[in-house]
Image (tube, helix red, strand yellow):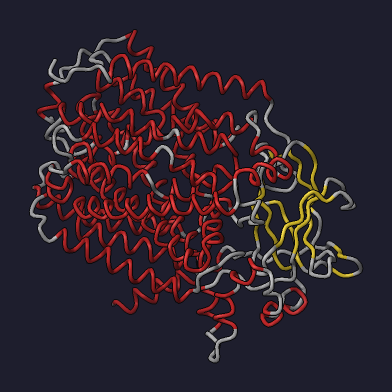
Amino acid sequence: MNYNPISISTALILLAFFGLVWLFFGWWLGRKNKSLDDFMLAGRNVGLAFAGATAMATWITSNTTLVAPQLTYELGIWGMVGYSLAALGLILFAPMAKRIKKLMPEGYTCGDFIRVRYGKPAWIVFLIVSFCYAMGWLVSLGMAGGILLDTLSGLSYNVGMTVILAICVGYTLLGGLKAVIATDYVQTIIIIVGVLVIGFVCYQTVGLEKVYEFNKEKHPELLNLLFPAAMMFLFNNIFFGLGEIFHSNVWWSRALAFRPGIGKKAYLMSGLLWLPIPIVTGFIALSAPVLGLYPESSDMVGPMVAANLLGDLGAIFVFVLVFSALASSLDSLLAATSDLVTRDIYNGLIDKTASKEKLHKVSKYVILGLGFVTWLICLPQITTLGALLNFTGAFVASTIWPIVLGLYQRRMSGDFVTAALILGTISGLIGYHMIGFYVAALFSCIVSFIICMIGLIAKNDNFDWQRLKNMEKAQ
Amino acid sequence: MTKYAIAVFLSLLAFSSGAFSSDKSSSDQCGSKKCPLKLELKEGKGEVITAGHFNLLWAENSGLTSQESSREPESSNSEQSKSIQSNSTRSNQDLSTSPQPVDSTVKKVLLDHQQHSASHLKISTDKMFTQITHDIEIHPTQYRISLTGFSNGDYYVQLFGDDDKEVSNAVKVIVEHHSMTKVWIIFTAGAVLFLLLIGYMVSTVFRHKEDE
């Protein structure tokens, strides 16, 4: 490592301390869970403060604290702005959250919606898309844990990644969504304060002028508004963010868990509060070359600069901050993916008559299994966080139009949605390999949009919204 | 049962720590001697860089003893005057100078790398390294670097030691950004699709009355 401001023993003590705190918190909140609704959807009764905090904390993830600086470091100004505009996902999802709660008050997952609204073929394709995304995100979070500890302490990537994964699996298992939402609240406060402090110190220490002058001379493309790859990335990242939120059960389960009338306000508030955060973390990355800091891997740049600026004690602060961001997303994703696997795959395809008690048990095994599979995939550290996340962009961006049109247009038909999901994803993957990670989501969304438009013109499904209220079982 | 599970877990962990390290050889010469380090472009030899961002990695050349290719831990202690390095080597010192040395296997699992002889990475626009554009400090335990923001052109990169003598082969990096025609087509397509989505959201989604 080229910058290890905290010793391995300090890192291990911090890990043990935070691990125990989160695990205790999970157990304490989870002991009152009586039913599947309690475990999966926190009793469907989450208020505005917790709702806003959980939406924001989940969206401030390793993506914001590690990938936003990475993409700014690689793609300059447009990388920073493009990343920040991913807030549009939360803002545009706000009215949809209200509609989701209204349309399917008894629903559990986004898979429930796709199955009833578009039929079995679209549902199966959607589950594959959603699962690929969830695994990509889970793996990126596990990797981020390893990278964080590696950057700050020199602790082996594998050890750090393993410990962080184990802690998050542990408290999600103990507390369910209630623990996830409550820890998110605490984590949000830590994250906002931390990012603001680091941004302020960076501005005071380095300053805008130095950043501009140095990068203009040594890394001119970072400041170039006609930087080719970055221009392509701008809209790509917007669609990636929209796809992530519109389709993912992380956000649907929250929409269903919030009290009626809370979802829209919570998502709007968290989106607007999140918007400036990638700008701050991005600016930190642009300061790296000025400070003579060139990371081993571009996804290490954020914590590396922050730790350098804040010194030894500050590095501990950075550790707590990024660990909180990671944990807040990792637990949410574990809980939401487990819901999707339990409800849609196990209850929908394997055991259709399973009781709620049995599903409750199964969902715990699924969390454990997901944690183990994530750990296995994380071990080789095959790519950078940004590249891995944007790979999943090819999958999720194909879901934007099917979800939006499915919620508001009776005409939209399942056959065309199935085609849009498949062909959109394939186009995105082709773009990813032929041009770069910065076009995957864009290509996927364009193709999916064209097929959806053809579908709207060619066929009228005349869907009855009442079917969503009744939550029909799979045939 | 539990101890077997833990043994399997630790074996997997130890294996994965070293499973992906490679033992590469090189015939590159640094002066009259074989270079102690082999420098490579991670994206692949001859690969054209289209986003101005690339990664370099280096490893000790096979056939050299550890003393020839690596720094002794003690020697690194004398170089602690530089502010960045003084902080960054603390964790290594903790392990290397403690009264009871940590077992090497445990150390290998906990720490990523041992120390090497490079202290600078230089980037030049010519083969002879007369036009140095970047001179970057390298930490003795660093084996990779991520570089960014380069404009079109050919660049030469090489690692140097404390005495400013080369300690690795030179690598040529070709930066050639995507054509602006392609970029404008993709950018415009993205902008149009974005406006269509925003238009639909504003006209339908945000104005939708749930009671209807």
Q: Position of residue B83 (x, y in %)?
A: 64, 68
- Viewed as shown, does residue A443 lie left or right of A231? left
Q: Residue furthest front?
A: A204
Given residues A433 and B122, the one toward you in this image is: B122
Q: Is residue A427 visible?
A: no
Given residues B174 and A131, the one toward you in this image is: B174
Q: Position of residue A415 (x, y in %)?
A: 31, 20
**In the figure, A466 relative to A21: above or below?**
above
Q: Quadrant of residue A225?
A: top right
- Viewed as shown, does residue A196 lie left or right of B94? left
Residue found at x 15% / y 17%: A464
Q: Position of residue B190 (x, y in %)?
A: 50, 22
Given residues A13 and A444, the one toward you in this image is: A13
Quadrant showing the C terminus of chain B:
top left
Q: Residue furthest top?
A: A457
**In the figure, B77 relative to B160: above or below?**
below
Q: Quadrant of residue B22?
A: bottom right
Quadrant showing the N terminus of chain B:
bottom left
**In the figure, A99 relative to B60: above or below?**
above
Residue found at x 54% / y 32%: A233
Given residues A91 and B105, the one toward you in this image is: A91
Residue found at x 29% / y 59%: A169
Q: Position of residue A463 (x, y in %)?
A: 19, 16
The number of numbered badges drawn on the structure is 0
